[in-house]
Amino acid sequence: MAMMKHLLALLVMLGSFQHALPESYSCSASEFKLDGEYILGGLFDIHHRNSSVVYNRPVIVDCSRQSFTLSSYRMFQVMRFAVQEINNSSLILPNVSLGYEIFDHCSDKFNFQAILNMISRNGSIQVLRCVNEYLSKVIAVAGPFRSMESMTVAPMFAMNLIPMVNYGSSSSVLSDKWKYPSFLRTTASNKDLIHLIILIIQHFNWNWVAFVSSGDENSQNGLQLFKSQLKDTKICLAYAKELNEMSDHYEILQQLEGLSIEVIIVFAGQSSAVTFIKSAIKHNIHNKVWIAGDSWSLNKNLPRLSGIKAIGTIIGITETVMPLPGFKDFVYLSQTQRNNRPSTCEQTPSRQTCNQACDLCSDVSPEEIIGENPSYSFATYSAIYAMAHALHNLLLCDIKGCSDNVTVYPFMLLRELKRSNFTILNRHIEFDSNGDPTSTSYAIVFWNQSGQAEKVGSYETDPTLDVPFSINNTQIHWYADQVPVARCSPECSEGFAKKIDGLHQCCFQCNVCPGMTYVNYTDDPYSCIDCRKTEWSKPGSTFCTQRSVEYILFTDPIAITLMFSTGVLLALTLAIVILFALNYDKPVVKSAGGPMCFLLLGCLSASSISVFFFFGKPTVTNCVLRYFLFLLFYTVCLGCFAVRSFQIVCIFKMATKFPKIHSWWVKHNGQWWLIAIVFVLQLLLLTTVFTASPPTPVSDMTSYRDQIILKCAMRRTVIMFLLLTIVLASLCFIFSYMGKDLPKNYNESKANTLYLLFLILTWITFCTASILYHGKYLQLFNAMSVLSSSYSILFCYFLPKCYIIIFQPQKNTQQHFQGIIQRYTQNISSK
């Protein structure tokens, strides 16, 4: 019953098909012609001429004697099917019949008779002044398939702007409208194909690839585009080879093995690609990734070859296959029509025109046609429909019919074709300014274990899509059960810069970036970039970290401790001042210096205040004050001690020897003059130096890589005012030594020596620390040294005297001091 229903359907289709064809078809030996009101031209390489024979006389190549190409024959049938479908439609070109004139275009050099036939009118080509009035035999042409063939014949059609709507030529050269003004295409340009190949390579993180092409224009254009698009990627073209009839496939394959290339792009014509893959099988090439161009990615015979799985994984790209509803029945119907020709047709001339016959086509079964590579079927189908829609618009067609008052010139049809904007089989057809389709859908296929081309991804050239490219990695079964690694050199570890090893940027050595540098793999993976001055990095870093800015805060525990100690010192100084004021007339206070003690204690307090300026963020003000206060007032302290020591020695040892000098010293208060001179001299020195070159805040960026130390920088001129301080300290020590045998209550050599010893040790310690350590706490050491210098005077000089006043008042009497002086005088006299 099912068989009967299928047969009945075929009979119904046959009736409608015969109605659509002219009556003469029943005895026509050719499928290449169909009469109609408007004729479309078709160029298909049903046969392909491979040999390059040089002729010494004019010839026309008989295409039927060349190699038969089943895939092109399928496209030929798709054009016939599309024309029939349009003629049977009431929606497009109603009551208008389309015809076609199709030629077997097997050569780009010896088939010009077909081209001349198409552009002729009634068998002749008229040379007119006004080409706009020229009516050719065909109003538009579909084809030819190959890019070189299109580039050869396009100028002849462009002469009268006869539209060429191509279905297979993808060379980007044909997008040049200056050279090919009447050329449009429904297949994508190589530019998109090559971009998709690069996206696949990048998706799998490959960068070491080979590109195998053939000698045709399309393949060469693909290679040029591949090289140009690689400039903005990290992919290296390790090897490029053009296949031709003389190519040694074994040598090529060995070169690929020698370069350790795992990914091979075969962007070649179908015959060249098939031969090359067969050679790879023959020569036992194993475990490679083969990226198939659109010419052979859906080849039906290669997947069935023994050993095809051993060569590795094959990934192909092709335009998304669109099923054509009704095409299968059309093919079966055409076969039935061909087999049911009357016997009288055998006497019908079969070759009235060159290359409009196909002797082998009758031997091709419908199953073979239907099962053949469908890659360009939709492009052919949509090309015919683009011509029909343009004609529909030009004839002002509507539901009722089309105008018969419009003369259709080819250039008018070209103008309408450029405006094409329609949808067919859910696909939008529109051309850009270059005559290329505005959107194309690609399928990424994987040759699975059963020999089928399984779709594993897609790519849409429509820029409005959010995710134009996608691959389902889980659907691809790799020969190694994981994505193969195709790299010249293994990727560097983090923090290592690449050093190019050889000619290719993909071949490199890895060198660790030193500290204070980093490598940016996004911008420049080949250089170690210096960090900014305010940043730092460890060796082997990919970024820099902001350096911490370090200085002593007022809230730092040690800073609080030092400020508290300074407060204690100031409190003790004030207490001593009060104690000395209450006992001003007592011998202990007088022997300690009397009024000079108050000056000394005041200067000691003033120098100690400088400690507070060592904390907080350094500024010019606190840098100046921390040094100015200490150096000025502590120098006065030393001056007081030096003068005091000198005065005691002068009284006991020089009064009798130099009575006049002693008398002048007492009369004119020499000690105050000396202290005043010391004060003024140090003040002038400090003012001059600090005005010319004051201590300023600086950022120490060299001591620590991860820190910026804020500190106050002292110039070398500090030696000038330290010199006076050193001289006074030395004089103090000398005079103290000279008075070592004076009366006990006036002998200050021990106290002076002790505090000077503390002073020297303190600053030696600080100098040593400043040499060994350069961190922020060096400022603390400086403040501690200042505080220690002040405390040494307080403890070594004033506290012993305070002890006598408070705890030994019997020693703080005039009689006690006179007794000591008498004993000293007796001792001197006895000597």
Image (tube, grey):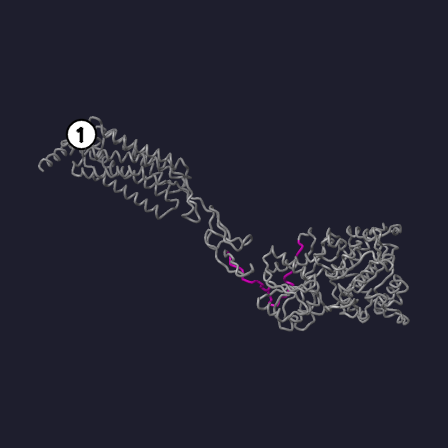
Residue 57: which quarter of the image? bottom right
Q: How many marks?
A: 1
The residue beneath circle 1 is 661
In this view, the residue in front, 294 or 258, is 258
Residue 313, placed above or below residue 791:
below
Residue type at numbered disc 1: Ile
Q: Secondary structure at mark 1?
A: helix
Q: Is residue 583 left or right of residue 104?
A: left
Q: Residue furthest top?
A: 667
Of 808 and 358, nearer the camera is 358
Q: Looking at the figure, which quarter contains the C terminus?
A: top left
Q: Quadrant of residue 718?
A: top left
Asked if residue 450 shows in the view, the reply is: no
The magenta segment: 467-494
Asked whether the viewer can see residue 81, the reply is yes
Q: Quadrant of residue 304?
A: bottom right
Percent position of residue 636, x then y: 28, 34
Residue nearest the viewer, comparing 638 with 783: 638
Up-down: is 499 above or below 781? below
Whether the magenta-drawn stretch holds residue 666 is answered as no
Q: Main secondary structure of the magenta part?
A: loop
